[in-house]
Amino acid sequence: MSFSKFKIGELRKIAEGFGVDIPAKTSKENLVLLLEEEGITYDMYERFSGAEKEDLEDGMPDPEVDLSNIKTVLVKMERSNPTYQVGNYIFTQQHPYIVMPEWDAQQIFDTNEGFRLANPREVQEYYS
């Protein structure tokens, strides 16, 4: 399968979901090329859309998990890759910052090079 089976509106939603900047006017073919340039494959889309469906089917979060006590941190990718996926997290050059639980961040730091803790001010400056 490929992205060519989608209509342009659906492709726009997919691109926005992955944080891809898209021009106001673009053709379907150019949108598919943009996704490919960002390293987003149809298989990657399938995995994420399947995970979202499972989350929706689950309904309410597990009552055993207390989400209010989860500490989160900002992680910045400093690698030169256009995109880089670690677990469920996808870093891109356009969006190198991701908020995640501390334990996921520690796992990334332990197993991958080119990542560091970021602070809120640098993220604000980057996106302003």
Image (cartoon, rainbow, N blue to C red):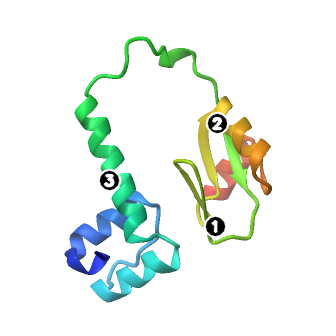
- Res 120 visible: no
The reply to whether dot 1 and dot 3 touch (C-beta < 8 Å) is: no
- Where is residue 64, by image quadrant? top left
Type of the residue with mark 3: Ser
Q: Which mark is residue 49?
A: 3
- Where is residue 2, by image quadrant? bottom left
The reply to whether dot 2 and dot 1 touch (C-beta < 8 Å) is: no
The residue positioned 46% from the left and 16% from the top of the image is 65
Q: How far apart are marks 2 and 3 (CA)?
A: 21 Å
Q: Which of 83 and 51 is in front in this view?
A: 51
> Percent position (x, y) of residue 72?
63, 30
Type of the residue with mark 2: Asp
Which SS class for mark 3? helix
Residue marked by disc 2: 104
N-term mark: 2 or 1: 1
Q: Residue 93 carries which label?
A: 1
Report the mark closest to the observer, 2 or 1.
2
> Percent position (x, y) of residue 41?
43, 71
